[in-house]
Amino acid sequence: MNRHTWSWIGALGVLAGGALLVWTISPLSAQSGSRVPVRSSPQGTIQRTPPGSGTQSGSPTQQGGAQRPARTASTEPFEVRLWNWLQQAQYRNWGPLPGRPADAYAGQEPHGAMVKIFANRTAAGSPDALPHGSIIVKENYGADGQSLMAVTVMYRVQNFDPEHGDWYWAKYEPNGQVSRMEGMAVAGKVGMCIDCHGSAGGNDYAFANDR
């Protein structure tokens, strides 16, 4: 069974004192029963370390027949690393949570008029609990169901934010750029996401598994 461990050093870099953080995602793979047949399940590690610490970089390597995304430069914000990892993991090959439509369905504010859900194996394997390591990606579309407006991500990380379900939040523009509001990146402990999802059933800050 895959293990998903996050090692924290201090607090987020945005907190006072500029404390540094090490985050590890290892390994998270595309799930079976996906929308599109997957020849090999992308797996990988994303690690953030203090600048100048000699973080590895380079081309993806092959191990056990599955591609492992390379570690990227330590100067990149974690939300950028997360987006890059999702692309290498081919999240669009993931299926929805059990019981959810595989195609786009009607959404509501602040998401698109139409939305499509993708869940990694950890989330899909235990949709009621959504254990740590769960990732839920929501593509937000216009009313035509074709025009991609944004991509929002929920990533459950042990001890990241216990008061609010331990979810890491991020919102991206269609081109992969991190969305910004009032000059701040919409990533991390995002108040508007926490406030909205706080009303989700089960007190787990997730609507996608509500029935």
Image (spheres, rainbow, N blue to C red):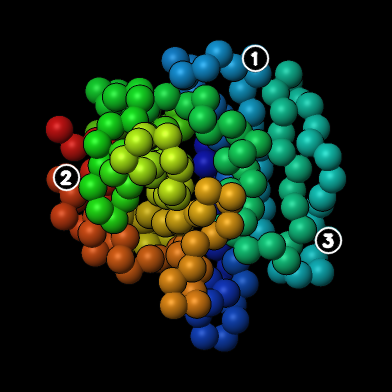
Residue 38 image point, x, y percent: 59, 17
Q: Secondary structure at mark 3?
A: loop
Q: Which mark is residue 39?
A: 1
Identify the residue position indicated by label 3 in the image: 54
In the depicted structure, whether residue 17 falls above or below residue 101: below
Are dots 3 and 1 in contact, CB under 8 Å?
A: no
Which quadrant, please, contains the C terminus?
A: top left
Are dots 2 and 3 in contact, CB under 8 Å?
A: no
Q: Residue at x 70, y 23 (%)?
A: 66
Q: Residue at x 73, y 66 (%)?
A: 75
Q: CA distance from mark 3 to mark 1?
A: 33 Å
Q: Which mark is residue 3?
A: none
Q: Earlier in the sequence, mark 2 or mark 3?
A: 3
**Residue type of the residue flagged with mark 3:** Gly
Q: Earlier in the sequence, mark 3 or mark 1?
A: 1
Identify the residue position indicated by label 2 in the image: 202
Residue 176 image point, x, y percent: 58, 51
